[in-house]
Amino acid sequence: MQITQDTAVTLQYTLREVAANGQPGAVLDKGHTAYLHGGYEGIFPKVEAALTGKAVGERINLTLAVEEAFGARDESLARSIPKSEFPPGVKVGGHLRGTNDQGQPQSYRVLKIKGPVVLLDGNHPLAGKALQFEASVTKVRAALPVEIEHRHVHGEHGHQH
Ligand SMILES: [Zn+2]
């Protein structure tokens, strides 16, 4: 079965940083993921486009420019707050809920505690990075009506609920 509109696709993937010389760099993430094919924003659009028509066992290997991956960093989302305002129980690597400059809800990652100041970052950890996405197709099946309704794949490597 080929990957077409409204198929549930499982991939085994490796996501790497792209080094300064353009060569594949450190592995950032690897594993399996399942997504609903056909414009449901379950995976990077460039990856989805490359997978159209592929079948189990076929591979893709793509470089994603910053804007094709998680986008540029927004330095206005890099914040610091006094340690005295820091809620108890939140650790480095955890998240704080706050608002951005436009007053919209924003989640901030706790980067580090530096003396009396806590450094926060609301950017995606991979924002500002070009990425290399290598994957092989491990499963393709027709999506269930409920998956199309929910706009995501259920079950193994998919949405659990
Ligand atoms: Zn669902």
Image: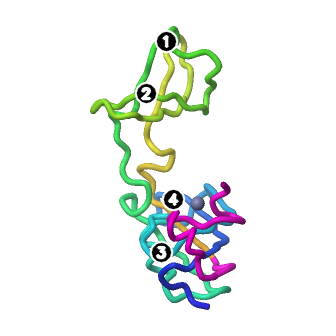
Q: Residue flagged by tag 1: what amino acid is it?
A: Glu
Residue in the picture at 48% in, 29% down: 97
Image position, residue 4 (x, y; %): 50, 85
Tag 2 residue: 98
Q: Which residue is mark 3?
A: 48
What's the residue at 63%, 68% (across, down)?
13
Q: Is mark 2 within 8 Å of ligand 1?
A: no
Q: Identify which amino acid the numbered label 4 is placed on.
A: Ala
Mark 3–mark 2 distance (CA, rounded to whole Å): 33 Å
- Residue 159 appears in which quarter of the rendering? bottom right
Q: Are marks 3 and 2 in contact (CB under 8 Å)?
A: no
Q: Which mark is residue 19?
A: 4
Q: Which residue is mark 1?
A: 85
Is 160 contained in the magenta span?
Answer: yes
Segment colored magenta: 136-161
Q: Position of residue 139 (x, y in %)?
A: 67, 80
Residue at disc 3, secondary structure: helix
**Label 2 or label 1, whichever comes before in sequence order:** 1
Q: Secondary structure at mark 1?
A: helix
Q: Quadrant of ligand 1?
A: bottom right
